[in-house]
Image (tube, rainbow, N blue to C red):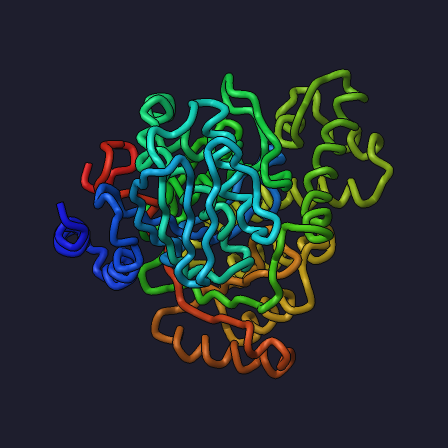
Amino acid sequence: MQKGRFMGENISELLKLTGHTPLTKRFSALIEALPDDDHGRGHLQFVPGRIEVLGKHTDYAGGVSLTCASSKGIAAVVSRHDGQSLIVEDLARSLSIELPFSNPAPIDDASWSIYASTVLNRMIKHFGEPESGVRIVMESDLPGASGMSSSSALVITVLLALLKGGEMSAARAALTSRTELAAFAGAIESGADFRDFPGGAGVGTRGGSEDHTAIFMSQPGELGLYTYAPIEALQRVRLPEDHTFVIAGSGVKAKKTGEARERYNLASLRASDVAKAWSEDADENCKTMGKMMLSPSFDRETLRHCIRNEDLWNRYQQFEMECDLVIPRAIEALVARDWSTFSAVTDRSQNMAEEWLENQTRETSDLARLARELGARGANGFGAGFGGAVWALVPNESANAFQSDWKEAYLGLHPSRASQVEFFQDTPSEACWTLGGASYLVLDLMS
């Protein structure tokens, strides 16, 4: 079958039938970028980014978070090639890497190759080499290093491409639900064990599976409340249809490499240290603060006596208040359209991030404050921190004016960020999907 007929006509018709017309132009450009000698056997896939509404650094610590998928994400065309390698071509950035199955090591002058390399290594370790060479031609409209999980989206893009494009039937048989896929993707990125499969190096960050859960399990128009390890959907909350998120990318890249990675991992290490201090004092084995708080013997005052270090105590207080106070009250307020309470509790979350997590920058703090001053229902920095983005919830009817005013006010304070910022409107969107190629019902759009 000719490439043009297979992907140009059939896929375009499927996209129209399934309501994904806005993606058609993006997929068409990716299809055109395929080499002429491509087999024409492949599939389309879309992997969204993530908006963390509330739940800063809570997932890996045994807590809950409130998230949704973004409408922005990575579109990819995946095909086979005759070699024994994974080829990833980033059309938007004009970048390309090739990782041989026999030695899938990261490429020195391509820092982003660590994500593809980590996924490929883990898949080969557990399931053997893919049956064919895999080519990914992709394009992302996610702001890079913005706190919207562009790195996790890349991990999942490569994972899905190998599962389907690489004909890895043993892996598909082992991963039979979106919940399992989310947990496995999180384990790949962090290097953690998954079921009976031993872990690996990961990409170097000590994170959890919040991003991967949102990417695999989100529903359009809804926010999802999840707990992790194991992943469980606790509640779905409809976002009022007359409201939308305005997202502001601060222009400060929320990187997870070098010194930034060390600061990111510090929040995780402090969470572990709190649980360890309690466990040693109580003669228990609580791996996370969440498990610690569920212990029948847990007592807050006793914990305070165990922890004399103020940084550790503040880390505990942020986790406790985010999970037990901020998130439940925010959900109640959102459902009741009690905007005063919603504003107050989201402000509390932002303040704790600034004072106790210490993961905000001047830019993200200013964005949150300006959004509130301009009348947003609530506003919060999100993601790992140390840069990235801020969301503001506003009525649809005032979203355009708010976005313009917010950007103007921000650049008035930070004019040097003018060429780096990105402001846009977003709504809770659907989870990742694939279309065409090898059958995998858990992901196939038409199943």
Residue 268 is left or right of residue 23, and the answer is right
Work out whether 391 lies above or below 297. below
Q: Is residue 29 visible?
A: yes
Q: Is residue 324 visible?
A: no
* Residue 211 percent across, percent down from the top left: 49, 44
* Residue 19 percent across, percent down from the top left: 19, 55
Residue, far right: 308
Work out whether 84 lies above or below 401. above
* Residue 276 percent across, percent down from the top left: 75, 27
Where, by quadrant of the figure, is residue 324 drawn?
A: top right
Residue for point 36% across, 45% down: 135
Where, by quadrant of the figure, is residue 274 drawn?
A: top right
Q: Nearer the viewer, residue 38 or 153?
A: 38
* Residue 416 percent across, percent down from the top left: 64, 79
Work out whether 195 lies above or below 185. above
Q: Nearer the viewer, residue 46 or 54?
A: 46
Q: Quadrant of the N terminus?
A: top left
Residue for point 44% across, 35% down: 182
Residue 1 is left or right of residue 108, and the answer is left
Residue for point 66% across, 57% down: 386
Q: Quadrant of the C terminus?
A: top left
Residue for point 77% across, 19% down: 282
